[in-house]
Amino acid sequence: MSGNAKITLSLLVAILVGLTVLFVVVRNTEDGAGQAAAERLVRPESHRLTSASDAQVTVVEFLDYECPSCGAAYPGVEQLRAEYAGRITYVVRNFPLSSHANAENAARAAEAAARQDRFEEMYRRLFETQQSWGGKQESQQAMFEEHARAVGLDLDRFRADVADPAVAERIRVDREDGIAVGVQGTPTFFVNGERFEGQPTYAGLRAAVDAALTK
């Protein structure tokens, strides 16, 4: 083999090795980014309204309890949860918007209720009564306390938990996770880590869930 041929072969081998290393680095980077995004979508402590033993399909909703669009989506979400009970895991994350005066306090009320194992009950009441408190500029804390009484919470403990900095921190983490995965408004849904781009209706969400179940 001539000297030029040896040099050419060496260069080709070096290029091949370099491309292989680049592919591995890119693949590992993509896998790492995907894992990081998955961890941002669902944390171990995230609220799961329904759970599936096979973990085949997970739906995550970033929501604002005062958001009219979230309120409009709520009946379809509840229908979906009922129909697919035991078949999908449904996770809700806080994403209160600064444009809604009582969204943060509503999220705190839900988190405080969770500390007394009444998260789902408060979640339901906040949405089912949204039209009576949403859109108001004055504090609706008195109404949230009425909800706390209605679902059987210890009111003194509820008030203390609403004011607990750890509750505010949990909401902050949810919001920051949402921003990290591209949430800009509410409601925003993810199905098995993929952002749902359709209309947040029962039919739209059901189609996405059915597609995920068949994969």
Image: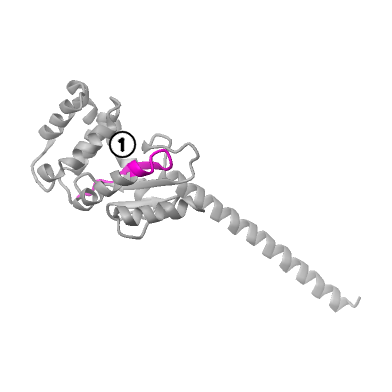
Task: State the residue at coordinates (27%, 29%).
Answer: 118
In this figure, which residue is indicated by the disc labeled 1?
Answer: 169
Q: Residue at x 77, y 67 (%)?
A: 13
In this image, 195 relative to 159: left or right? Answer: right
The residue furthest right is 1
Q: Is residue 163 visible?
A: no
Q: Nearer the viewer, residue 145 or 10?
A: 145
Q: As shown in the figure, which amino acid type bears the numbered disc 1?
A: Glu
Q: Position of residue 132 (x, y in %)?
A: 10, 43
| Residue extent of the magenta highlight | 81-98
User: How many numbered markers are drawn?
Assistant: 1
Residue 194 lies left or right of residue 20; in this view the side is left
- Verify whether residue 37 appears in magenta: no
Residue 59 in the image, given as x and y percentages of width and height: 39, 47
Outermost residue, front side: 83
- Secondary element type, mark 1: helix
**208 to 82, vertically: above or below:** below
- Which residue appears at 21% of the width and 48% of the height? 71
Residue at 23 percent of width and 34 percent of height: 122
Q: How is the image coloured?
A: one colour
Residue 86 magenta-highlighted = yes
* Residue 117 coordinates in the image, percent (x, y): 30, 26
Can I make out residue 2 in this image?
Answer: yes
Is 19 left or right of 129, judged from the image as shown?
right
Mark 1: few/some/many CA within 10 Å (<14, 14-19, 20+): few
The picture places residue 1, in percent across and down from the top left corner, at 91, 75
Front residue of 10 and 48: 48
Q: In the image, is residue 5 above or below residue 205?
A: below
Vertical comparison of 208 with 144: above or below: below
